[in-house]
Image (spheres, rainbow, N blue to C red):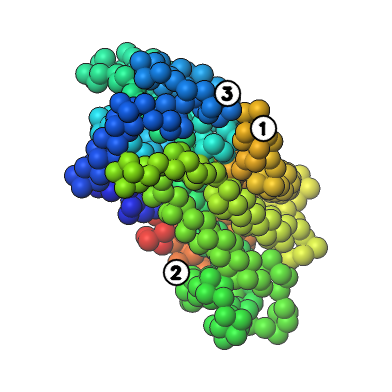
Amino acid sequence: MITLTGNRLTMEQMKDVLFRKQKVRVSQESMEAAAKSREAVERIVSGSNIVYGITTGFGKFSDVLIDKEYVQDLQLNLIRSHACGVGEPFPEPVAKAMVILRANALLKGFSGIRPIIIERLIELANKDIIPVIPQQGSLGASGDLAPLSHLALVLIGEGEVFYKGKRMDAHCVLQQEGILPVTLEAKEGLALINGTQAMTAMGVVGYLEAEQLAYVSELIASMTIEGLNGIIDAFAEEIHLARGYKQQIDTAARIRRYLRDSRLTTLQGELRVQDAYSLRCIPQVHGASWQALDYVKEKLEIEMNAATDNPLIFKNGEKVISGGNFHGQPIAFAMDFMKIAIAELANISERRVERLINPQLNDLPPFLSPEPGLQSGAMIMQYAAASLVSENKTLAHPASVDSIPSSANQEDHVSMGTIASRHAYQIIQNTRKVLAIELICAMQAVEFRGIEKMASSTKKFYVKGRKQVASITQDRIFSKDIEKAAEWIKQIDLSKI
């Protein structure tokens, strides 16, 4: 059971909840802080004070005063009018992450929302009632208004959910589970939708997949080194200590561990003096990607525990401040960095694929074909890898450098962080397929070299890999192999290699 406090949620805990079926609960202390914040909102409403989003309209309508008898109408209209998302829904783990992250942010006690709203969010998460949330339509400031409005719809018994493998009307599912829809009171609609939880949730799920992919990429690259009789000297500890980047040092150390008893690697001068950069510079390139991923993780874990709505309530309501914590710029940058970091893993992987199949660059059978000429072997797999790499380059264009004014120029600079997070996720999916292609080619190459000469770790990996993808003894529909290998890469437990 993971306890939400609003302050200490980690990436590992999110992994437990999203992929290991852990439940969540809230700390009593945090719930009490939320209740006190709510009392402050009620005092503001009863006193008819002028406070943005509580007794006024929203965005450009912030100067329009709303009579307290219309408070509920104001919040309901806000949710319905802002539910303008379009396109395919977010993956279910992402939508579930949004629910958990929104609850965690509200538990900080700065949002003025009733505890019952937080309890409902926790109930949705624990019962796997997942809001159907369209991916497109957010500018990333004022937060993720459109996506989070679709989340909020479920709380009031509207919209759709994924439930037990089906897409259903939220009202029917809530009724089935005995959950009463809520009527939103003052500020509660605004508190639910004014935040960065869509981009952050997409970023969290993307990061968890990217981290796994980055680790597996090193193991696949190690097998490629064996398939090409790569020079092990380039991974010597002294070289990497001399430069000083921790991530580069760690990457080289893992590759040395994978290849420590290999009889397929060579020493410098034994077959050749130097390898090409795509082999020799694996620690430098992969290590740099790890540097970016470490930055991404740090920013995501801050944002996972951040108060990102507006206005925020301090000192039991003595201070209610309109600010801009909903602006997604920190996450937009982080997502753009993640895009570049993962795209580079694909770039260098595709170059290793080329070295594995090109007879002008190795002494293996051309295109790893069992009958060169009659059978094409891995020739077109490299085409597919090149296509994915090129697509990644387009997707890696930074979203965060763009901005379009909205709300009649009241909101005149936005982050596009949600677009960045979505594109990062697509790059991760593409890169996994490129690495799947490298894995298929590397397994074929080591067979020509002699499996009995492989390192213990890579041989174990090879044996497991061959249970997923058979050896190429005849041309076949390789699309199926690539998809199967990619799915396996996503699931493999590296602790068992």
Between residue 312 and residue 159, name the one nearer to us: 312
Q: Amino acid at mark 1?
A: Asn
Quadrant where the image shows the C terminus: bottom left
Q: Secondary structure at mark 1?
A: loop
Task: Check disc 2 and report the residue beneath it.
Answer: 456
Which label's residue is closer to the chain start, 3 or 2? 3
Give the spatial CA distance, label 3 vs label 2.
50 Å
Could you say whether the residue bearing mark 2 is in a helix, strand or loop? helix
- What residue is at 57 percent from the left and 61 percent from the top? 292
Mark 3 residue type: Val
In depth, the one of 232 and 33 nearer the eye is: 33
Q: Secondary structure at mark 3?
A: strand
Say which of 253 and 267 sits in front: 253
Q: Is residue 105 left or right of residue 240?
A: left
Residue visible at 55% across and 22% down in the picture:
84
Mark toward the viewer: 3 or 2: 3
Residue that appears at 31% across and 47% down: 315
**Among all residues in the image, which is located at the extreme left?**
28
Residue carrying label 1 = 409
How far apart are the two marked residues, 2 and 1, measured between alpha carbons? 62 Å
Q: Which residue is mark 3?
A: 86
> Is residue 161 visible in this depiction of the protein?
no
Image: 157 above or below 482: above
User: Three-letter amino acid code at disc 2?
Assistant: Ser
354 and 164: which one is in front? Answer: 164
Spot occupied by residue 190 in the image (x, y as percentages of width and height): 43, 30
User: Against 263, is 291 above or below?
Assistant: above
Q: Residue furthest right?
A: 360
Left or right, residue 477 beside residue 148: right
* Residue depth check, mark 1 versus mark 3: number of the one nearer the observer: 1
Residue 156, compared with residue 465, is above or below; it is: above
Residue 395 spot, x, y in % from top left: 68, 43
